[in-house]
Image (spheres, rainbow, N blue to C red):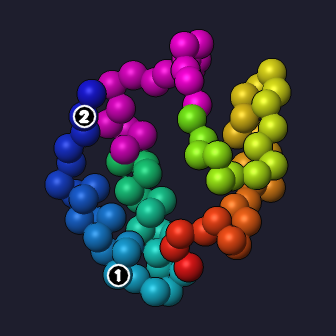
Amino acid sequence: MGYKNLEVDRLLEKGRRTFDQDERAKIYQEMHKMIYEDQPYLFLYSGEVLPVVHKRFRNVEVSKIGIGYNFIKWYVPKSEQRYR
């Protein structure tokens, strides 16, 4: 599966170069609208997935709804961080 849209690419680059957060939000909203309108199909459920998280991450909890529900609480101890 792939996606190619030159206008979306242009907006992505423009957003990356825009420091004003309100203006950047407008650019990304326009870009997301274009992607939404272009999508040929939408995955509502994917039962056969295997999430992988490096062992350096702490506070990853497994639940019936997956592991991503508490991602805001994940962290890597300072002693194990590679990029600072």
Which residue is drawn at the image coordinates 35% and 81% (left, top)? 17
Total number of numbered discs in the rendering: 2
Image quarter of residue 40:
top left
Q: Secondary structure at mark 2?
A: loop
Displayed quadrant of residue 22? bottom right
Q: Would you say residue 47 sits in the magenta stretch?
A: yes
Quarter of the picture holding the N terminus? top left
Please name the amino acid that badge 1 sits on: Arg
Which residues are the magenta region?
A: 35-51
Q: Residue at x 68, y 52 (%)?
A: 57
* Of callouts 1 and 2, the N-terminal one: 2
Q: Please provide percent x and percent y for residue 15.
A: 38, 73
Residue at 38% x, 56% y: name it.
31
Whether 42 is drawn above or below 12: the answer is above
Q: Residue at x 31, y 74 (%)?
A: 14
Would you name the residue on which mark 1 appears? Answer: 17
Does the stretch in magenta take in 39?
A: yes
The alpha-carbon separation of the residues under discs 1 and 2 comes to 25 Å
Question: Compared to 81, does 34 lie above or below?
Answer: above
Q: Where residue 38 appears, x then y in whole percent? A: 32, 36
In the rendered image, the quadrant that contains the C terminus is: bottom right
Measured from the top left, where is residue 16 in percent x and y? Answer: 37, 75
57 vs 43, nearest the viewer: 57
Q: Secondary structure at mark 1?
A: helix
The residue carrying mark 2 is 2
